Amino acid sequence: MPRIYVASLTDYNHGELHGEWIDADQSADGIHEDVQAMLATSPTAKRYGTVAEEWAIHDYDEFDGIELGEWDSFERVSALASLLKDRPAAVVSHFVDEGHELEDIPDLIADRLMGEYDESTELKAVTAHHREQFEGRSDIPEDISGHLEAVAESMARDDLNGGGLYTVEARYSGGATFYVLSMD
């Protein structure tokens, strides 16, 4: 679950660490309320009889390659967490890195995501995608039906070299997952 560590700058500026991990998968208003509750318990503000008002995002977790700044808006944090909840993190990160508006990313993923493949290379992932497209088809001539793997690999090479499809890779211990995307 994506979360952010928000620190009280009142405390930070007085040499104390005071902050809280906050669930990012909630509304911007919910994040704001959690931050205000954290600031209300500021030990420095209590000590000096003041109110802690300033905060900064000092850490974040499970945003899978998407960078957050210290003063990113809670609207952006909430929108990213929402996107990551229902969609592949590597693909969301790819579209964020390309500079797309957050509200456009769900439609881009719906339009461009062709499949998810746990394969060792990009070529194998796109080959698996094409092989999957052949399954259940009755219009494939018999003389090539025994060569579908070679046809699928040839189509994959054409797509990767010619720009018809591309992949976004997510590495993990022991392997990789490739998300095949169309160029459209």
Image: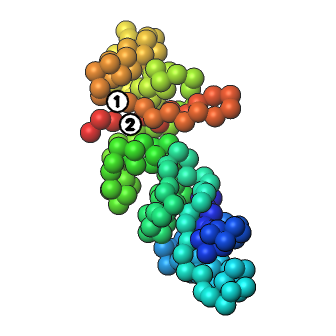
Type of colouring: rainbow
Quadrant for the C terminus in the image: top left
Badge 1 amino acid: Leu
| Residue that mark 2 sits on | 181
- The residue sitting at 33% across, 23% down in the picture is 159
Pointer 1 and pointer 2: residues touching (CB < 8 Å)?
A: yes
Q: Which mark is residue 133?
A: none
Q: Which mark is residue 165?
A: 1
The image position of residue 57, as x and y in percent, is 56, 63
The image position of residue 85, as x and y in percent, is 54, 58
The answer to whether one can see residue 128 in this image is no
> First in sequence: mark 1 or mark 2?
1
- The residue sitting at 73% across, 85% down in the picture is 47
Above or below for 10 versus 84: below
The image position of residue 83, as x and y in percent, is 47, 57
Left or right placement of residue 9 versus residue 74 in this view:
right
Badge 2 amino acid: Leu
What element does badge 1 sit on? strand
The image position of residue 106, as x and y in percent, is 38, 55
